[in-house]
């Protein structure tokens, strides 16, 4: 009895009507006007129970608590660091976000993270006004070498794959260490860095295709033999 | 009376819209209406500079409209002018009602509209391009904004005037219109018209906007809609053996990020101009 105008996985653009019914709720990237739910963004419709949402295909990274991101230290304040995380605003890493106790009267904060350092950090909490980072996570660290490439943040879930299937294939085949930032920056280091960079480009370009993991896997294999 | 280029009174000029034409921008679009060409680029939302222009409850849509010096028959002096300031403002006000600015407090959305070639109707072409570029940039919007001008020449109503026609009009009237919510967000008039004429001209312009809306949607679809797995794709030779720098060979609706991380060695900071 639903009046679906667009179905699950359909492509929508801003202002497209998805459903005309009060039995559903607007989720992410959707809004209600009158009896209908419309899309706010370019994306794909996702219906989960009674919630209609749109999976965005483009746009700047929107920070969410718990995400791991890669950022560059921009400035040092008395109580922490300002970090550029390639998002709508700059993020702040407070002293409380660092694993050890720091006595600011005795320590130069740049000994920990200097301006220009690139770090892998967790988003502590994020709202529309502030983004707080934290290093209190086993994965969080400072990068001292390696390479970083930028990709469309909307395609990051594809790079990781279901339960990490895609990223594990790339890690296994290339032997590189890889850290994926949800904000669209990917760090990697190892002997076959070029392979990883190629793989990321392919994932990004063909994100919508089926059987991508196998294709990336065979691509990495082919290169290995050569 | 016949129109200079043989169009019917209610016809638009040939329209071409392309999304994602500027690789560095978060979103971009090109709109060609006859001989008028407008490019729009959107950056952000990002930190707003200067800081004093930040709004604590919503984003600021910083709009800059300008004409390229070579866009007109006589050289157009570059830089800000009274005219470009005015058009920047009306463009911003035409687009603001369509955008969920309140989702990004304290940030700025930067919109640049460049008129590459001008043959009347530059503000409407600019708004059409801007609205596609904003959608392309993933900015949350209520609706797309379309814009078309119409005017009155010798007791006849003409849609989407070109420059030679505009010279002869009693008045021309550009409007911007949100087709889904059926709201007019820009209404200007250059000249004198009776109330009856204004109504008729507006009706005509709104009809033009509906056509433009379809073209805008199509442009966004062409860029973003994922094509079903087709034979051509599978038949392609295994994989480009080259570095990701094979930019020229990109398929038309290339995923946005293709371009973004070419400088693989460093973080490209968004602030970098």
Image: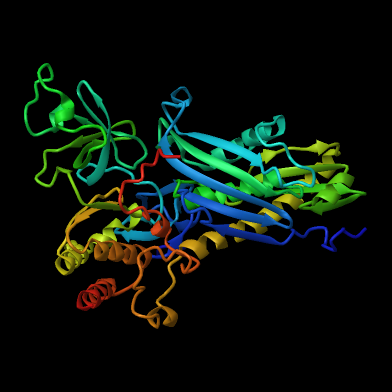
- Residue at the extreme top: A105
How many numbered tags mark residues here?
0
Which quarter of the figure has residue A142? top left
Q: Position of residue A69 (x, y in %)?
A: 24, 45
Q: How is the image coloured?
A: rainbow
Pick the front one: A104 or B38: A104
Which quarter of the figure has residue A202? bottom left
Q: Position of residue A139 (x, y in %)?
A: 12, 47
Q: Is residue A147 left or right of residue B96?
A: left
Looking at the image, which residue is at 37% across and 65% down?
A205
Pick the front one: A201 or B38: A201
- Residue at the extreme left: A100
Q: Is residue B149 left or right of residue B192?
A: left
Q: Position of residue B23 (x, y in %)?
A: 48, 54
Looking at the image, which residue is at 43% across and 55% down?
A21
Relative vertical location of residue B269 with respect to residue B161 in this rendering, above or below: above
Which quadrant would the N terminus of chain B be assigned to in this image? bottom right
Q: Position of residue B161 (x, y in %)?
A: 79, 51
Is residue A4 visible in the rendered image? The answer is: no
Is residue B93 visible in the rendered image? The answer is: yes
Looking at the image, which residue is at 68% across and 32% down?
B86
Relative vertical location of residue B11 with respect to residue B28 in this rendering, above or below: below
Q: Is residue A78 left or right of residue B243?
A: left
Pick the front one: A157 or A9: A157
Which quarter of the figure has residue B89? top right
């Amino acid at each position: 009895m639903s009046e679906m105008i667009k179905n699950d996985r359909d492509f929508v653009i801003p202002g497209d009507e998805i459903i005309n019914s009060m039995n559903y709720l607007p989720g992410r990237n959707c809004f209600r006007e009158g009896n209908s739910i419309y899309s706010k963004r370019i994306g794909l419709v996702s219906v989960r129970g009674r919630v209609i949402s749109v999976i965005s295909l483009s746009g700047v990274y929107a920070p969410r608590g718990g995400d791991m991101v890669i950022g560059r230290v921009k400035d040092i304040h008395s109580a922490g660091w300002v970090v550029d995380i390639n998002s709508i605003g700059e993020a702040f890493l407070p002293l409380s976000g660092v694993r050890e106790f720091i006595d600011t009267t005795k320590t130069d904060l740049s000994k920990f993270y200097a301006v220009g350092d690139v770090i892998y950090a967790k988003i502590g909490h994020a709202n529309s006004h502030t983004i707080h980072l934290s290093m209190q996570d086993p994965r969080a660290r400072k990068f001292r070498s390696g390479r970083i490439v930028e990709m469309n943040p909307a395609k990051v879930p594809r790079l990781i794959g279901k339960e990490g299937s895609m990223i594990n294939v790339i890690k296994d085949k290339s032997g590189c260490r890889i850290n994926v930032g949800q904000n669209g920056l990917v760090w990697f280091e190892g002997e076959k860095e070029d392979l990883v960079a190629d793989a990321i480009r392919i994932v990004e370009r063909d994100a919508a295709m089926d059987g991508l993991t196998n294709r990336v896997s065979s691509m990495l294999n082919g290169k290995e033999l050569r | 009376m016949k129109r200079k280029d043989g169009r019917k009174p209610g016809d638009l000029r040939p329209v071409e819209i392309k999304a994602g034409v500027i690789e560095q921008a978060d979103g971009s679009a090109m709109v060609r209406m006859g001989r008028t060409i407008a490019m729009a680029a959107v950056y952000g939302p990002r930190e707003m500079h200067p800081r004093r222009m930040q709004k604590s409850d919503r984003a600021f849509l910083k709009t800059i409209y300008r004409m390229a010096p070579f866009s007109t028959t006589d050289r157009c002096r570059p830089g800000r002018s009274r005219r470009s300031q005015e058009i920047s403002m009306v463009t911003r006000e035409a687009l603001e009602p369509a955008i969920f600015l309140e989702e990004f407090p304290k940030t700025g959305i930067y919109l640049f509209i460049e008129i590459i070639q001008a043959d009347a109707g530059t503000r409407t072409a600019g708004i059409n391009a801007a609205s596609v570029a904003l959608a392309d940039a993933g900015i949350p919007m209520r609706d797309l904004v379309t814009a078309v001008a119409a005017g009155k020449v010798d007791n006849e109503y003409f849609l989407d005037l070109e420059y030679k026609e505009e010279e002869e009009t009693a008045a021309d009237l550009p409007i911007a219109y949100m087709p889904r919510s059926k709201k007019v967000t820009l209404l200007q008039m250059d000249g004198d018209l009776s109330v009856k004429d204004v109504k008729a001209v507006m009706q005509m312009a709104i009809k033009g906007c509906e056509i433009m809306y379809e073209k805008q949607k199509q442009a966004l679809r062409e860029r973003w809609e994922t094509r079903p797995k087709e034979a051509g794709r599978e038949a392609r030779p295994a994989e480009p053996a080259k570095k990701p720098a094979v930019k020229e060979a990109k398929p038309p609706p290339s995923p946005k990020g293709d371009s973004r991380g070419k400088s693989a060695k460093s973080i490209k900071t968004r602030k970098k101009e």
